Image (cartoon, helix red, strand yellow):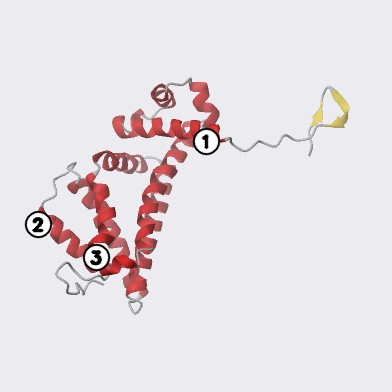
């Protein structure tokens, strides 16, 4: 129904169509998400309050609420940005046709994320929120399902004769190893060593169906 104008009962009032965000609006929204990401990475999910984000951004609370009316809206947008950025790097794996001749190049970008302590801390906070927040958990599960899907595509393209169940299993184990290794290689739960890195790379290459650094096939995983 079209709402009527109480001051002019003769005719209806045309509904208002929200205008598209302006470039400046996009910039302000991005700046608020930058502040939220800083709070999450430096203070943790428990401290990710609307007031804390507004203070970090140097704006009034009402300004933050104009773009993100509730904490759930802010959290959803923040997770979307964090996970989308990481997924874009993972997606490059499925497109890395030339990388098949240089196995190290396939992994370098993904393993390189472990060298960024701030990024790993950010993900540990995301994981912690997912353990207590249903919305965060859903976003994280969707992210890892897409992550495994990209890896499975990479494996399938290079080993088309592999059983589909084995292909998916390889992809999911690859994701498990990559994400678990982040805690240890980043220094949060341990430290990377040449020996552990070499063993990790051999296992990951094997799961991808790529030749190992010695030039021989690292086959056998299924």
Considering the image in quadrants, where does the C terminus appear? Answer: bottom left
Question: Crowding near pointer 1: few (<14 within 10 Å), some, many (20+)?
Answer: few
Residue bearing the label numbered 2: 195
Image height of 118 relative to 200, above or below: above
Q: Nearer the viewer, residue 96 or 128?
A: 96
Position of residue 58 in the picture relative to residue 123 (left or right):
right
Question: Crowding near pointer 3: few (<14 within 10 Å), some, many (20+)?
Answer: some
Q: CA distance from mark 2 to mark 1?
A: 46 Å
Q: Check contact, mark 2 vs mark 3: CB within 8 A.
A: no
Q: Nearer the viewer, residue 91 or 122?
A: 91
- How far across and how far down the image is residue 179, in percent? 27, 52
Image height of 37 relative to 180, above or below: above
Q: CA distance from mark 3 to mark 1?
A: 39 Å
Q: CA distance from mark 2 to mark 3?
A: 18 Å
- How far across and how far down the image is residue 154, in percent? 35, 67
Position of residue 134 in the picture relative to residue 101 (left or right):
right
The mark that comes first in sequence, 2 or 3, is: 3
Image height of 75 relative to 50, above or below: below
Q: Check contact, mark 2 vs mark 1: CB within 8 A.
A: no
- How far across and how far down the image is residue 78, in percent? 43, 39
State the mark number for residue 26. 1
- How far across and how far down the image is residue 190, in percent? 14, 45
Residue 165 seen from this side: no
Residue bearing the label numbered 3: 103
């Amino acid at each position: 129904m079209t709402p009527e104008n109480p001051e002019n009962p003769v005719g209806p009032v045309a509904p208002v169509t929200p205008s598209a965000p302006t470039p400046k609006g996009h910039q302000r929204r991005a700046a608020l998400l930058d502040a939220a990401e800083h709070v999450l990475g430096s203070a943790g999910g428990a401290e990710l309050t609307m007031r804390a984000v507004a203070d970090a951004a140097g704006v009034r609370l009402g300004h933050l609420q104009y773009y993100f009316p509730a904490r759930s809206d802010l959290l959803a947008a923040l997770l979307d940005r964090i996970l989308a950025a990481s997924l874009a790097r993972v997606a490059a794996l499925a497109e890395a046709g030339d990388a098949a001749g240089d196995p190290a190049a396939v992994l370098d970008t993904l393993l390189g994320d472990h060298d960024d302590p701030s990024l790993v801390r950010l993900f540990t906070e995301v994981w912690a929120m997912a353990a207590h927040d249903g919305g965060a958990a859903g976003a994280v599960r969707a992210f890892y399902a897409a992550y495994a899907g990209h890896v499975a595509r990479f494996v399938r393209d290079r080993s088309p004769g592999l059983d589909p169940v084995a292909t998916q299993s390889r992809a999911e184990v690859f994701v498990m190893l990559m994400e678990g290794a982040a805690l240890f290689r980043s220094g949060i739960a341990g430290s990377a060593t040449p020996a552990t890195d070499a063993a990790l790379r051999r296992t990951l290459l094997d799961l991808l169906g790529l030749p190992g650094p010695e030039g021989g096939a690292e086959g056998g995983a299924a």
